[in-house]
Image: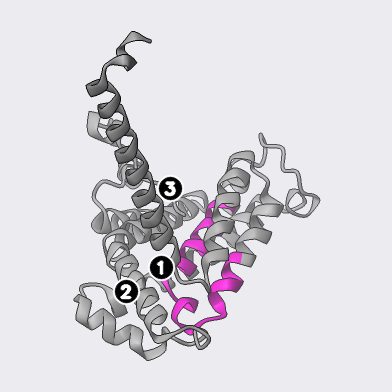
Amino acid sequence: MAFLKDKKTRTLIIIMSVLVAIALMISRSYYRSVNNSFDPRVVPARELYTEYNNLAVLNEFEEIFQLLDSIENYYNQYPHYADSYETGVVFNNRAAAYLTMAIHKDSMVIRSKYFDAMSKDTLFHLAEDAVKSAITIYENWMTLYQGKSEDQLDEILNRNFFIGLESYTEEEKEVFKNRRIEEIQTAQLETPRRLSVSYSNLGLIYRNYQEYEMALENYKKAIDLWDQNMDARNNVNLLLGRPKEKRNLIQKMFPPQKEK
């Protein structure tokens, strides 16, 4: 390679290599610090959700419910998390699984004797119980946290966030708390959408009960919370005999995220 014989070229390559190495070290240090800032009490619950996504794709319902139970148990160990939005997500995911089985029971192979033996009505009622629990948790969480400033969140977390962190230093506790405040600030934006999805699921349940007024009421609640909830909007259109709305280009490119 003749170009390597040029001193300036060799020097430039060395400098670039050093810069790349430094960048890698900085990025590794950054991601290590980010990971270390997560509350260690609930890291196992977060990790279990990576398995949940795979199971959901495969419709492995028995394992899905076992996993969701495990996730909920991690959160329920600590007062701060027991009624937090994460627990609401668990219940709404349960509801979604029950709904999937109920709606597709005649066409889907359910690899579980326990769930396969259940009637559609039973599955819909289980979904109803789960989604109503999710709604209660989300609404209570929003009452406590929605619209709160960073200082107000700090004050709220000081009440019970540190229970279970007694073995950590004060500095570490502060890091965990600050990270949690950031998560709550993100959840302040996302939880109305999550609640909208729950109301949309409840509307679907009532629609299958043929209780159309109740279905319409819940779909409208879903839209009030998140006007881009296309499932709710089109179910309202269906119930009112109006044409289905088409997703625009932005909605197609950036579809709503699934619950997790």
Residue topped by disc 1: 37
Q: Main secondary structure of the magenta part?
A: helix
Q: Amino acid at mark 1?
A: Ser
Colouring scheme applied when the structure was drawn: one colour
Give how far apart the Cα atoms at labels 2 and 1 are. 8 Å
Q: Residues within 10 Å of mark 1 (few under 14, many from 20)?
A: some
> Residue at image x 30%, y 37%?
254
**Viewer-nearest residue: 137 or 214:** 137
Which amino acid is tagged 2? Answer: Asn
Q: Is residue 181 above or below residue 117?
A: below
* C-alpha span from label 3 to label 2: 26 Å
Q: Position of residue 244 (x, y in %)?
A: 31, 33
Instruction: Name the element at disc 3.
Output: loop
Depth check, mark 1 against mark 3: the one in front is 1
- Which mark sits nearer the N-terminus, 2 or 1? 1
| Residue located farthest toward the right when viewing the structure as drawn | 113
The quarter holding residue 29 reads: bottom left
Above-or-below relation of 166 to 68: below
Q: Position of residue 207 (x, y in %)?
A: 46, 50
Q: Circle 2 is placed at which residue position?
A: 178
223 left or right, relative to 66: left
- Asked if residue 230 lies left or right of residue 63, the reply is left
Query: Callout 2 environment at 10 Å: few (<14), some (14 to 19), or many (20+)?
Result: some
Q: Is residue 249 left or right of residue 128?
A: left
Question: Marks 1 and 2: in contact by CB < 8 Å?
Answer: yes
Magenta segment includes 70: no
The magenta span reads 71-97
In the image, 36 versus 10, the foreground residue is 10
